[in-house]
Image: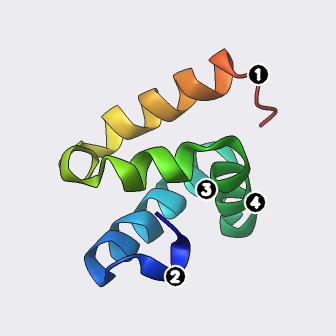
Amino acid sequence: MTKSNISFSIMEFMVWVVEVTANEFFNGDKTLAYNTLSETGVWDIYIDHYDTTHSLSKEFIINEINEYFIKHEVKI
């Protein structure tokens, strides 16, 4: 799904994911969080599986993203 075709509810969720990620891994830097999520493919995973991902807890998302970063050797 391209970023221009995202519904409002999906975009609203992704903004929240960026905020959670920024606060947990990037000292609140939302631009760095967004860029990292986009460049590593996490952004697309959460959008493509929105039907499931939007119901996950903050703690689950943080743990899942952390595991993804470790597995793919993403520098944070």
Q: Whole-Å distance between the Cαs marked 3 and 2?
A: 22 Å
Which residue has dot 3 on it?
Answer: 22
Q: Whole-Å distance between the Cαs marked 4 and 1?
A: 16 Å
State how the image is colored.
rainbow
Three-letter residue code for mark 4 = Leu
For the residues carrying marks 3 and 1, which lies nearer the camera in this image?
1
Q: Whole-Å distance between the Cαs marked 1 and 2?
A: 29 Å
Q: Whole-Å distance between the Cαs marked 4 and 2?
A: 20 Å
Three-letter residue code for mark 3 = Ala
Residue 25 drawn above or below residue 4: above
Q: Earlier in the sequence, mark 3 or mark 1?
A: 3
Instruction: Sort mark 4 into few (<14), some (14-19) or many (20+) by Cα contacts within 10 Å.
Output: some
Labels 3 & 2 near each other (Cβ < 8 A): no
For the residues carrying marks 1 and 2, which lies nearer the camera in this image?
2
Secondary structure under the numbered disc 2 in the rendered image: helix
Which residue has dot 4 on it?
Answer: 32
Frontmost residue, 56 versus 5: 5
Secondary structure under the numbered disc 3 in the rendered image: helix
Q: Position of residue 74 (x, y in %)?
A: 76, 30
Residue 28 left/right relative to 59: right
Frontmost residue, 52 versus 55: 52
Q: Position of residue 39 (x, y in %)?
A: 73, 50
Secondary structure under the numbered disc 1 in the rendered image: loop
Which residue has dot 2 on it?
Answer: 4
Which residue has dot 1 on it?
Answer: 73
Q: Position of residue 33 (x, y in %)?
A: 67, 56
Labels 3 & 1 near each other (Cβ < 8 A): no
**Residue 27 is at least partly visible in this image:** no
Q: Earlier in the sequence, mark 3 or mark 2?
A: 2
